[in-house]
Image: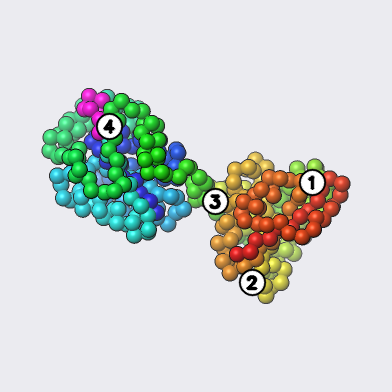
Amino acid sequence: MDLIVIIGSGAVGKMTVGQELMKITDFRLFHNHMMIEPVLEIFGKFDGSVVSRLRDVVFEEFMKTNYQGMIFTFMWAFDMQDDWDYIKSVTDKFEATGGTVYYVELVADRAVRLERNKTENRLRNKASKRDIEASEGRMLREETKYRIVSNDGEIPFENYIKIDNTNLEPDVVAKMIKDRFNLHDKGNADLVNRIKLDPVKEQEIGILHEMQVMSFMPLYEKYHDEGSPAIEPVERIQSRFAVTNRKYYFILLDGVRVGAINIGHNDPNEHEVSFISPLFVLPEYQNRGIGYIAIQKAFELLPDVKTWKLETILQEPANCHLYEKCGFVRVGEEKIVNDKMTLIDYILEK
């Protein structure tokens, strides 16, 4: 997992640039005050050891996610060996995963930073800065006590850039960082982390049936297919549920049931071939990439499966595109259901 470390003086714009960078990449922002503010609130004063321990928990858990990486902001005192050691300890965690660490140093004129110290965004996210007179005093004391701007050539890292953002908007700086380090565009990692597959319990079959009817009814009204899941009786779902080697999962988005997927085989002794039938997403949640992620998570649930099979409607190009995007290949002959609808088979060999 990758890491972007944004460093610089107080109110230089580290958090704000990080917010903009998060909008255009698959990196998530973990700015310095996300841990500082709770510690100040709970303990009534700053405690560096507590802040560091809390950060470590966040780092550890975040590295288990599917994001490309994290944006971490930090005010680095270059004349303090402890700060060099701390940055190394953090970057070592990410490099140990095989990730790349990028360093961004922001510098800006003091007058501009004093104005930025009063912005709504800063005061909303950092309660300890809301006493403007006190926070300005801290800024000036920090600059007097520590060297917070690096000397030329002092930063030895290959992936390093220094940006004077005195007259630059945060989104412009974010784009500069993205381009300089050739970071990938924002993808679906955020959605991946929000979607879970939850096994359906027997007492939930009624709910599953209602969701299936709602999801497939638009297709039934369009094609009038007598084999449609929209008109499938609940008993058919119950019999499928009872098969040893098949399993239903609710698709959860932020804990809300938005669809379902059934995977497995009718033969209880089969472990290398699996069908996906059915897969559905409620109409109001369709066209968001949920089905694609649900399929990827199904693959993860059955890692021993070598062959995946499914069936879909030829006249539904969005469905065909979804399965082809997942790696499925169309096989076999077309099966004409009626004058409006044709079924086709797809297969994926792992």
Q: Using the numbered discs, state the Cα–Cα distance from disc 3 to disc 4 in whole angstroms.
A: 40 Å
Label 1 or label 2, whichever comes before in sequence order: 1
Q: Residues within 10 Å of mark 3 (few under 14, many from 20)?
A: many
The amino acid type of the residue labelled 4 equals: Asp
**Residue 193 appears at what percent x and percent y?**
49, 51
- Ranked by sequence position, the earlier of labels 3 and 4 is 4
> Are the residues tagged 3 and 4 within 8 Å (C-beta)?
no
How far apart, in angstroms, are the residues tagged by discs 2 and 4? 59 Å
Compare marks 1 and 4 and give the one earlier in the sequence.
4
Q: CA distance from mark 3 to mark 1?
A: 27 Å
* Mark with earlier residue (2, 3): 3
Query: Where does the image place residue 7, in percent across and percent down from the top left?
Result: 27, 41
In the visual, does 123 lie left or right of 344?
left
Marks 3/1 in contact by CB < 8 Å: the verdict is no
> Which sits in the foreground, 75 or 53?
75
Q: Residue at x 60, y 43 (%)?
A: 288
Quadrant containing the N terminus is bottom left
- Helix, strand or loop status at disc 2: loop
